Image (cartoon, rainbow, N blue to C red):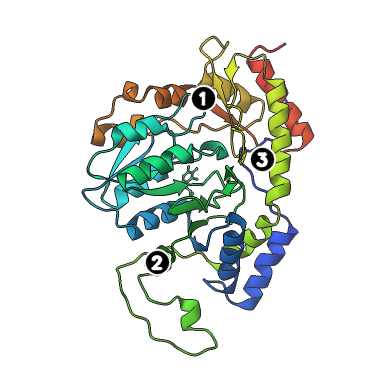
Amino acid sequence: MTDEPYIIFGSPIITQAEIQSVVSTMDSCWIGTGPRVHEFQAKMAAYTQAKHALAVGSCTAALHLSMVVSGVGPGDEVITTAMTFCATANAIVHTGATPVLVDCQRDTLNIDPRAIEAAITPRTKAIVPVHFAGRPCDMDAIGAIAKKHGLLVIEDAAHAIETEYKGKKVGSISDLTCFSFYVTKNITTGEGGMVTTNNPELAKKIQTYGLHGMSADAWSRFSDKGYKHYAVVFPGFKYNLTDLAASIGLVQMDRIEPWLRRRNEVWARYEAAFADLPVERPATPEPNTVHARHLYTLLIRDDAPVDRDTFMGELHRRKIGTGVHYRALHVHPYYRDRFGYHPEQLPNANWIGEHTVSIPLTQKLTDREVDRVITAVRDVLGGR
Ligand SMILES: *Cc1c(COP(=O)(O)O)cnc(C)c1O
């Protein structure tokens, strides 16, 4: 139906600059964890205005490690949203703690602070808010609940590297914040993640527990300063990032702001183009916040000519990739069966999970591709 190439959902931009950066790292022979990782950490700390940034192999590792260093374990409960990627809750399960999934708000798709408050028990140890699509959660309300009940806040900022909340960068707000550099995220290292914190003790533990529980990393052990003994202080994990990955991230970081501007342009075109369709569009951002524009989601209303899955099939036929972010976690077999959730227990997440679709929103999209997406969406949804 079109001779034009398939628009792959979430395809990253990789230029000669990234390639040359990796090549020069390979030439240096420091391909494991070394100077490039340290540089990447410093750059992320500066960008997020956090005191410490520790690189890890993924956001999943970042979430797991953040909980372990905070002492989350068996017998504890951790509250998070059902409207998230499975990694958020899987990381809780891996600590031995119980994930307590609560509902999201119908309009913002973010965790509902009232639902958090209602789910608190004497076993609650932490709250894991997820800044859905890059829109900041209500951190004032969440911070107040955490303070009142003595709980940790660990933010899942996989979508939210550019996000700001009332003048503060995400990464500098809570106890710990976890970022992702997975291929489809706003910037990528192939695979990668970062934990930021203002707490020097947590930072030290992240570094140690993230690399076997050894007291010093390989770079400082085998540098030209001579061999140093290490001491194992905890049965840690192999969660370190490589210099190869960091050398991609260092280049991508310089593009964060122009890329966000481009996604803002695409977002504005979608907003104008879909106003008359039988869909719910993303909620308008709150004043005094920066939305990271990671996903543009449409909720296909019940009075639309097609349902969500048919819509996705029709876009695929027009060579446009789409995604679902997310089918609610509490309806997935593991969470449903192990913890006994019913779909209607979290009605917003359940409804959104059945009706939501994400259309392409990356800096890579050309104006011509945006035209194609708009034409296809309007065509399938009966727009004239
Ligand atoms: C992508 C994602 C993760 C996992 O990130 P990885 O770096 O792939 O481990 C976690 N949470 C959310 C909300 C995500 O979108």
Relative to 153, is 3 on the left or the right? Answer: right
Q: Is 153 rendered above or below residue 334?
A: below
Quadrant of the drawing holding the C terminus: top right
Q: Amino acid at mark 2?
A: Glu
> In the rendered view, would you say 157 is above or below 58?
above
Residue with the mark numbered 3: 362
Give residue 340's position: percent from left, percent from top.
Answer: 24, 30
Query: Does the rendering let one see residue 333?
Result: no
Residue behind mark 2: 201
Q: Amino acid at mark 3?
A: Thr
Residue 122 makes an appearance in the image: yes
24 and 340: which one is in front? 340
How crowded is the residue under tag 2: few (<14 C-alpha within 10 Å), some, or many (20+)?
Answer: few
Disc 3: CA contacts within 10 A as few (<14), some (14-19) or many (>=20):
many
Q: Which residue is mark 1?
A: 107
Q: CA distance from mark 3 to mark 2?
A: 37 Å
> Marks 1 and 2, Cα distance to the nearest angstrom?
38 Å
For residue 227, what is the image quadrant? bottom left
Instruction: Give the Cα distance between marks 3 and 1.
Output: 23 Å
Residue placed at 51% from the left, 56% from the top?
193
Q: Residue at x 33, y 21 (%)?
A: 344
Label located before the other in sequence (3 or 1): 1
